[in-house]
Amino acid sequence: MTQFRITRIATLGLSSLVLFSTLLAAQTTKTEGLIKARNGDTMILQTSESPSLTVLLTDNTQVGQVQGVLKARRKEMSMAALIPGLAVKVEGVFNDKNQLEAKSVSFKGDDLERAQSIQAGMHETQQQTAQNTADLEKNKAAIDQAVARFGQLDDYYILDEVTVYFGNGKVTVDPKFTQQLVALAEKAKSVNGYMIEVKGYASAVGSVALNQQLSEDRAGAVTNILLQQGKVPLTRMLAPGAMGESEQVGNDKTAEGQAENRRVVVRVLQNKAIAGT
């Protein structure tokens, strides 16, 4: 065998090895775990293999909720649904920084509800009006169970807040609040690692089911203004919370109290770890 052929075979072998290594590095990885923290396009995932796996979200990342008894159907969702406390399955490729660039993220609907319950209970003050209805007791129990299951999640500073009020049975945002929301969005963009939380509420007048829907529609209307007019990126929005009749701040026996309870609360949050404390 000539020296030329030996060299050529060695070169081809080396090329094949490099190609194989490249393909191996780009191999798709599947993992599942709990979202510990979310900062814009970055998630920290707690898995059985790693307590802090960094997952990168891109404009091409597909987010979906699996549905059906066999979990065979998939509903497309917004990245805003990826909140701390949510159990997810991630498929992607590791980059040269050992970060998992997500091609797809999926989760179950009941896991999202539990994670939202945690978010709903994270920032409430101790000065809440006492409630004795069975629905509120059930909600409190669900929050306690979720906190016990997932443990202590991220602590946030509340840096700014705007409350939007609605007419009886209305879900359209009064134009006078639009400028306040846009100003809040602009101020938030100067905060390192900010997130925006939107929670909708209703008065206790009428049926529980109707008020739950009203609170969801109100939160959605405010979120649309923040996204479309405030130009807030989806990656900076937490999933809107529909709180229904819970957490009443006014006396529902009076017209004034009812008006106070028909509201959406928007908060600018910053993770304490990002703030450096």
Image (spheres, rainbow, N blue to C red):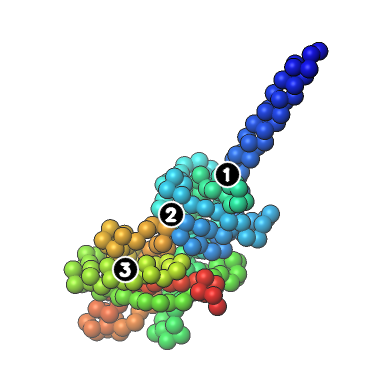
* Residue at position x 55%, y 54% in the image: 55
Find disc 2 in the rendering and name its residue.
79
Q: How many marks?
A: 3
- Horizontal and vertical percent position of residue 218: 29, 65
Q: Earlier in the sequence, mark 1 or mark 3?
A: 1
Q: Is residue 140 above or below residue 111?
A: below
The answer to which image quadrant residue 194 occupies is bottom left
- Mark 1 and mark 2 in contact? Answer it, CB < 8 Å: no
Q: Circle 3 — which element?
A: helix
The amino acid type of the residue labelled 1 equals Val
- Horizontal and vertical percent position of residue 86: 53, 59
Find disc 1 in the rendering and name its residue.
93
Left or right of residue 170, residue 68 in this image: right
Q: CA distance from mark 2 to mark 3?
A: 21 Å
Q: Circle 1 — which element?
A: strand
Q: Is residue 186 above or below residue 87?
A: below
